[in-house]
Amino acid sequence: MSLDADLLLDWFADTARDLPWRRPECTAWGVLVSEIMLQQTPVARVEPIWREWLDRWPTPSAMAAATQGEVLRAWGKLGYPRRALRLHAAAQAIAGQHGDVVPDDVDTLLALPGIGAYTARAVAAFAYGKRCPVVDTNVRRVVARAVHGAGDAGPPSTTRDLRDVEVLLPDDRAAVYSAALMELGALVCTARAPRCADCPVFADCAWQRNGRPAYDGPAKAVQKFAGTDRQVRGLLLDVLRGTTGPVAKSRLDLVWSDAGQRDRCLHSLLVDGLVEQTADGLFALPGEHSPVEHSPVGR
DNA sequence: GAAACGTGGGA
DNA sequence: TTCCCAAGTTT
């Protein structure tokens, strides 16, 4: 059983959001930037930052010439700032080794930093029209329901997930079909309270035929945030983003009362390359000041 | 395969 | 207010 491609494509043509990275004039670089930003981050928060980035850095080589600190500041509060560092590194690799052209094949894309199974195929499909399965959380949910008749997707398995979608892809317009599958999951077949009355493939849906059973897979782990290192790292980085020059450790000490956790987080940020210690012992975003050579983190 | 990794909005 | 969730990748 499969999902009617014509119904889905017609629905997509009528209903899809007019997102800037879907416009025909958007470059492959614009698509890549959008895909990295959209990893775990909602469209509404990505769109304004994406516009700033494409205005400021319209090509991989333009971004490659920026410092890491500039990139991290421009990333702002999108979250998971290592994505910004990896995108910067990817831009340098594309500029230096691929003639400033975003690669169009999945394996070459996979070799770039920050690009995994989803993003590589999303770029190949959406920027270059390749016929390859593009599987994100939306697609996994749509397939779990409409094809397998389950209440929701179980734990991810890249091999199985790719195969599940591969067999659904039509021979032509496969890239648009993938975009439509994602859009369906984002707008109609949502995690909570799906809008089945508006679904273009309602008639094909195995979950409906099954009597809409509840999800019966293993419980999904809920991520805590308050009090975690993730929160503390975010607070530390936010200080450095908001200042022009390097800051003293005493300034960073103000963001969290637990000294042990605070120092552990600062150290991990240094290890991750998100923060640098300057020659005079201050702390700053990387790439904008002469860094200390050998002795990290004083106390 | 599990855990770590930011942030904010909607229910 | 608390909890869930949002176009994942890396180790």
Image (tube, coloured by chain):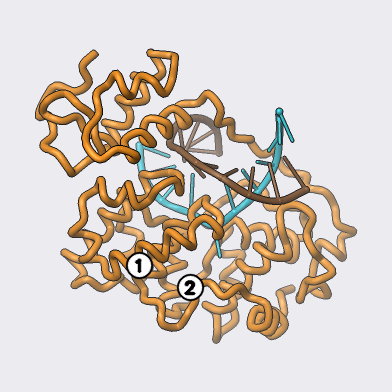
Chain colours: A orange, B brown, C cyan
| Mark 2 belongs to chain | A
Classify mark 1: helix, strand or loop: helix
Return the x and y of residue A233 as percentages of the image width and height.
Answer: 40, 31
Q: Which residue is mark 2?
A: A20
Q: Residue at x 30, y 36 (%)?
A: A272
Q: Give B6 or A102, whichever is nearer the viewer.
A: B6
Instruction: Give x and y (percent) for residue A111.
Output: 30, 58
Foreground: A6 or A89?
A89
Decide which of tag 2 and tag 1 comes sooner along the chain: 2
Numbered disc 2: secondary structure: helix
Quadrant assignment, res A50: bottom left
Q: Is residue A155 left or right of residue A57?
A: right
Tell me if label 2 and label 1 are in contact, CB under 8 Å: yes
Q: Residues within 10 Å of mark 1 (few under 14, many from 20)?
A: some
User: Looking at numbered disc 1 in the image, what kind of residue is underneath it?
Assistant: Leu
Q: How many marks?
A: 2
Tag 2 and tag 1 share a subunit: yes
Residue B3, image x, y percentages: 51, 30
Residue A183 shown left or right of residue A86 in the figure: right
Label ID, residue A181: none
Above or below: residue A26 compared with residue A45: below
In front: A121, or A171?
A121
Residue occupying image coordinates x 18% and y 43%: A287
User: Badge 1 is on which residue?
Assistant: A54
Q: Is residue A295 above or below residue A225?
A: above
Tell me which chain the residue with mark 1 is part of: A
Amino acid type indicated by mark 2: Pro
Q: Is residue A158 above or below residue A224?
A: below
Q: Residue at x 38, y 70 (%)?
A: A30
Q: Residue at x 33, y 40 (%)?
A: A241
Picture quadrant of residue A69: top left
The CA distance from mark 2 to mark 1 is 11 Å
